[in-house]
Image: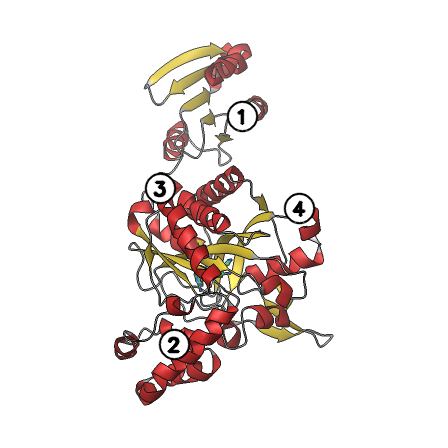
Amino acid sequence: MNIIKNIKGTHDILPQDTKRWRNLEKIVNNCCSKFGFEEIRTPIFEQTNLFSRSVGEQSDIVSKEMYTWIDRDGTSLTLRPELTASIVRSFIQNSLGWKSPIQKLYYMGPLFRRERPQKGRQRQFHQFGIEALGSEFPEMDAEIISIAWNIISECNLNDSVTLQLNSIGSKICRDKYKEALKKFIAPHLNKFSETSQKRFTDNTLRILDTKSQEEQSILKDAPAISLFYTKEDKKHFETLKTLLKSIKIPFSVNSKLVRGLDYYSRTVFEFTSSKLGAQDAILGGGRYDNLVEELGGKPTPGIGFAAGMERFLIAMTDYKEEPRIDIYFANITEKGLPISLLITNQLRKLGFRVTSDTLRRSLKAQMREANKMGAKHIIILGEEELEKQLFVIKDLNKSEQINIPQSEIIKFFENLTI
Ligand code: HAM
């Protein structure tokens, strides 16, 4: 019979990996709560038009990567390919803006994009991310980037990442810039790929994202977006740069960074890692000051980021695994089972991680298992110990062993916790 396998581009996260996941989740939870952010969880699937109206019909995500189907009642549904749209939907629907003038939210969870799978790129992947809704000021941008930097530093990745920063200006600026860019590219258009030619009409700024050397060399002389900033755009970006310098977060301005989602305005940023292969974008984000209004809410500025958790874990190579248990109870006789179960449960109540053998193996085999699991102590209960009503306790770190009356075992371990 054929064995049923997982779907291409999806992965099982096996027990040997879940510890590393939990370690990353703990770092994210701690950092976000240090900054006063609260966790939000939204459904895995949403109405398709939520994504087409926010991420944009012409974006790669909406035009070719979404898992979309028509439900039995005829509604078009989509597995979420990103989370900003869902958070904004929830913000509007639950009137979160009325509850507080600033909402600081974070999230973690799976997302789905039908991309070509490769190292660090899956069809089901996970992100952690944050969204702050309510402030248009650059100090909010600095705080968002600061959280990203904090998490990156806690993961020991700060020496291997680079932060690229840009402002794509407000809508007035972008409209003028698109015209100028089109005027510049038009005489060279036949040298551009089919994808770029399509972007020329549909999504002009994305042409700047091209990976083609030839196109990049033409675009080298293209006008910079900064020439089209309004006075306010310029002041916003200058203040953000000053703030980042004052909190010592290293960055470089990349005037060609536009990012692939339509909702951005003003600040955009991306962290790339030298520890990844071709898919080196580890975290990306930006401002979306018009998105809440575009999705039917009261005008509310917003900014956030999301990071690929699989990519973080590939880059976090120096993670040291914690031992699996503290105490191994090696019971050798059938008669000893009730005491073994009683004591292991009492020790768990004290907070110890305890396991015992359920395969009725020899003492030697159980000792081997205890060592493999990283136990600090082994409690041995054999025929002789049962008779004398005691336990042998082996301290594996000190290579010492003592005998203890059965009635004193809990006190012995209680004293160890002090
Ligand atoms: P994004 O740049 O599309 O932005 O994704 C953010 C991060 O998710 C990427 O930098 C990458 O680390 C990871 N990622 C994306 N696609 C994949 C994939 N197929 N496999 C593995 N990892 C992947 C957003 O999603 C925006 N919602 C970010 C944002 C939040 N902007 C404002 N707020």
Q: Residue at x 32, y 73 (%)?
A: 211
In this view, the mark in front (1 or 4) = 4
Q: Residue furthest right?
A: 73
Q: Which residue is mark 4?
A: 100
Tell me how many marks there are: 4
In this view, the mark in front (2 or 1) = 2
The verdict on label 3 being within 8 Å of ligand 1 is: no
Mark 1 or mark 4: name the one nearer the start of the chain: 4
Q: Residue at x 43, y 66 (%)?
A: 229
Mark 1 or mark 3: name the one nearer the start of the chain: 3
**Percent coordinates x, y for residue 35 in the rendering:** 51, 40
Whole-Å distance between the Cαs marked 1 and 3? 24 Å
Whole-Å distance between the Cαs marked 1 and 4? 39 Å
Sort mark 2 into few (<14), some (14-19) or many (20+) by Cα contacts within 10 Å. Answer: many
**Percent coordinates x, y for residue 71 in the rendering:** 68, 73
Whole-Å distance between the Cαs marked 2 and 3? 39 Å
Q: Which residue is mark 3?
A: 319
Sort mark 1 into few (<14), some (14-19) or many (20+) by Cα contacts within 10 Å. Answer: few
Contact between labelled residues 1 and 2, with CB atoms less than 8 Å apart: no
Contact between labelled residues 3 and 1, with CB atoms less than 8 Å apart: no
Q: Which residue is mark 1?
A: 351
In this view, the mark in front (2 or 3) = 2
Whole-Å distance between the Cαs marked 2 and 1? 57 Å
Q: Quadrant of residue 281?
A: bottom left
Q: Which residue is mark 2?
A: 207
Secondary structure under badge 1? Answer: loop
In this view, the mark in front (4 or 3) = 4
